[in-house]
């Protein structure tokens, strides 16, 4: 099974990048605590391609990078993780709405141009 990232590597969304950003924000935390936070954020940022079926949309850049999201989100470590999870869900829902529009457009073209040609 293949996966996509809601916020990709070019915007700091891979596990190693998340870990680095968290260690800059919370230098007082243990390595284990930082790794646990990073894994939790990475898990929320990683989805199956089956749930996100448009490669061109999945490559769209987000309005905010993961690095900036971590840097600008205030709160305790656990609050930060929950806020970022909510933001990731919001970004995913926005991307899905773009996919729905694309699929509806393709379906209309299929039904009016391709399907009639196949049925002949």
Image (tube, rainbow, N blue to C red):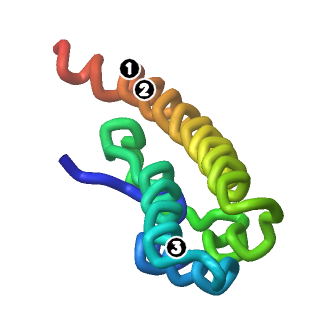
Q: Which residue is mark 2?
A: 107
Image location (x, y in percent) of residue 92: 57, 45
Q: How many marks?
A: 3
Q: Is residue 56 visible?
A: no
SS class, disc 2: helix
Q: Name the outermost residue toward the top.
A: 119
Identify which residue is drawn at 59% across, 67% down. Answer: 61
Q: Which residue is mark 3?
A: 18
Where disc 3 sits, the SS reads helix
Residue under the point 74% across and 76% down: 71
Horizontal relation, residue 7 to residue 112: left or right: right
Q: Earlier in the sequence, mark 2 or mark 3?
A: 3
Residue at the spot 42% in from the left edge and 71% down from the top edge: 15
Q: In the picture shown, does residue 92 fall above or below 103?
A: below
Distance from the alpha carbon under mark 1 to that under mark 3: 44 Å
Pick the front one: 62 or 115: 62
Relative to 95, 57 lies left or right: left
Quadrant in which residue 84 is drawn: bottom right
The image quarter in which residue 109 lies: top left
Q: What percent of the width, then of the height, locates residue 99?
A: 52, 40
Q: Are marks 1 and 2 in contact (CB under 8 Å)?
A: yes
Q: In the rendered image, which residue does mark 1 sit on?
A: 111
**Taking 100 as reference, is 46 above or below it?**
below
Q: Would you place residue 115 above or below residue 7 in this image?
A: above
Give the secondary structure at mark 1. helix
Please identify, in this view, whether the residue under mark 1 or under mark 3 is nearer the observer. 3
Front of the two marks 1 and 2: 2
Q: Earlier in the sequence, mark 1 or mark 3?
A: 3
């Amino acid at each position: 099974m293949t996966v996509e990232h809601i916020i990709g590597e070019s915007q700091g969304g891979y596990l190693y990048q998340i870990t680095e950003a968290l260690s800059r924000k919370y230098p007082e935390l243990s390595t284990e605590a930082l790794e646990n936070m990073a894994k939790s954020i990475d898990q929320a940022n990683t989805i199956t391609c089956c749930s996100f079926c448009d490669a061109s949309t999945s490559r769209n850049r987000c309005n905010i990078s993961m690095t900036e999201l971590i840097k600008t989100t205030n709160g305790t470590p656990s609050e930060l993780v929950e806020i970022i999870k909510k933001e990731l869900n919001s970004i995913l829902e926005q991307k899905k709405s773009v996919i729905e529009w694309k699929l509806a457009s393709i379906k209309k073209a299929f039904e009016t141009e391709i399907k009639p040609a196949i049925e002949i």
